[in-house]
Image (cartoon, rainbow, N blue to C red):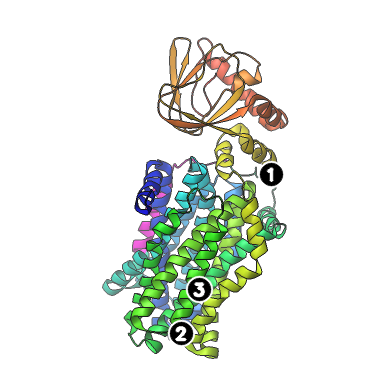
Amino acid sequence: MSDQARSVSVVRAVIRNGPLRRVQLAFAGFNAAEWAVWIAMLVYAYEQGGATTAGIVAFVQLVPATFTAPLAGALADRHPPARVLVAGYVLQAAAMAATAAALLAGGPAPLVYALAALGACAVTITRPSQAVVMPALARTPDELTAANAVSGWIESAGVLAGPTAAGLLLSAAGPGAVFAVMAGVALLSALAVAGVPGPQPARQAEATGRWALAGEVATGVAVLRGRPGARSLVGLLGAQYVVIGALDVLFVVLALDVLNIGEGGAGYLNAAYGAGGVLAIAATVALVGRPRLVPALMLGIALWSVALIAIGLVATTVGAILLFAAAGVGRNLFDVAGRTLLQRAAPGHVLARVFGVLEALTMGGLAVGSLLASALVAIGGPEGAIIGLGALLPLLALAGWRGLISVDRSADVPVVQISLLRSLEMMALLDPPVLEGIARKLEPVAVGPGDEVTREGEPGSRFFVVADGELDVVCGETRVPSLGRCDGFGEIALLDDCPRTATVTARTKGLLYALERDDFLTAVAGNTQAAGEARRLADERLARAAPPLVAGREGSALP
């Protein structure tokens, strides 16, 4: 298959998945808004007190976000992550609207900065929550990789769309208009993901009290401490934002002091970098179905770093634009491969908290990078500064090489299957190690239109979960509501050791996951809460459906 055909196939797979499509559309709005308001605030701060004030304001916005990001990750493990994702977008919209009101009313600058900082804190909710929601919406591991690739393209496109929109709005009406419009965009993102299904919380909120949430944040940090490979990966992914934060400053320095292409030149260099990320489509598509991701990750680092070093050695306008585009390709390949690998490697029950730690490193890295750029320029000039940045990630990658190889070889956490099981109430009550254990034992079962999965009256030996497709259910002569994604069926025959009570037939092409009887009973019976929930559901259905047996949604068939 050609790269173009693979690209179309990836996009088509994401588009066909309605909930996943809505999450990606919301993420596109989020990225555009994030970039637009960041630029608008820097412009406002520059107008208030010049470059020094702009730098201080950037730092002031990023530092609180650095500390709130792990808390945001813990929220997505403690509460339904799809709801947390919606709440994050609503909070962003509210903070942007309040900032817009302060700007348009001519409010004091400290108030404007404080409101913008609140918005930056709310931004940290999105990526950790989305990292948990997407595996629950993907039907296969390959589709999850494809969704991550599309997210990478969206982030790169946001580097183009956000600054462009900000520039137009700043020219027409000023910073207040940027915040007002982007508040509307954030609200549209919230509406897009409202009602999107998602898994149950990764763990029940058993801990209470003032420090419960802080304790859960510490759990995410402890997981990374005990897994050197995952720790190296998170550190490397976070370090890229030191480079990105420094580049935000160096774009301006290179344009004005080295290339002499004026203030607009900084925008051109930034746009070339973003365009390179969009051009990375073919490279990231190649990650779909690839069992090992560290080679692609290292290739992305190499391309990104070589391009930056080359800019420092041979600085010409055309060369810089082309090389920044190449750097954008490398950065996107590195980021998509790294985030996908982290999803595979991190334990499912702390996935959001691990990504919360990464989000904290993201914000902290941007802050450090903005300060580091000035120091590097003072030491080695603009050319030396960008060469130093180009050498940073390869050195860190070499230092953590063994850990990265180790995590790539052992990264087989069935995150898609775990998320699918967590959509069922009785399974969501299982302890995380048990849930991961039965997720590994699930067997994929492909079905086509007309294929019979279970027959009424026959012995039952497996429990099924629907990953994709629609199935018809017939009890006796009665056709009852069909089954779809995130529905489970077959538990009554296993729990009561009785024949199947319904015939289930595939209406469309689909994918099921099957769990053998002994594995199902061992897992469910071994957990008092899960066993109680399973028994309650079974009794409720039997009472409601007899006679004839009737099935509803949420694992509601009764075969």
Instruction: Give the number of the disc on residue 206.
Output: 1
Q: Nearer the viewer, residue 24 or 417?
A: 417
- How packed mark 1 is, by other alpha carbons closer than 10 Å (few <14, some 14-19, many 20 or more), is few
Q: Nearer the viewer, mark 1 or mark 2?
A: 2
| Residue 272, horizontal then vertical, whole percent | 36, 71
Q: Earlier in the sequence, mark 2 or mark 3?
A: 3
| Residue 374, horizontal then vertical, whole percent | 52, 85
Q: Nearer the viewer, residue 495 or 172?
A: 495
Q: CA distance from mark 2 to mark 3?
A: 12 Å
- Contact between labelled residues 3 and 2, with CB atoms less than 8 Å apart: no
The number of discs equals 3
Instruction: Give the number of the disc on residue 305.
Output: 3
Residue annotated with mark 2? 313
| Residue 423, horizontal then vertical, whole percent | 55, 37
Magenta-drawn stretch contains 196: yes
| Residue 83, horizontal then vertical, whole percent | 50, 46
- Identify which residue is drawn at 44% across, 71% down: 327
- Identify which residue is drawn at 55% across, 41% down: 199
Q: Nearer the viewer, mark 1 or mark 3?
A: 3
- How packed mark 2 is, by other alpha carbons closer than 10 Å (few <14, some 14-19, many 20 or more), is few
The amino acid at mark 3 is Ser
**Up/down of 102 relative to 142, above or below:** below
- Identify which residue is drawn at 70% across, 51% down: 209
The amino acid at mark 2 is Leu
Magenta stretch: give its range: 180-200
**Up/down of 304 relative to 259, above or below:** above
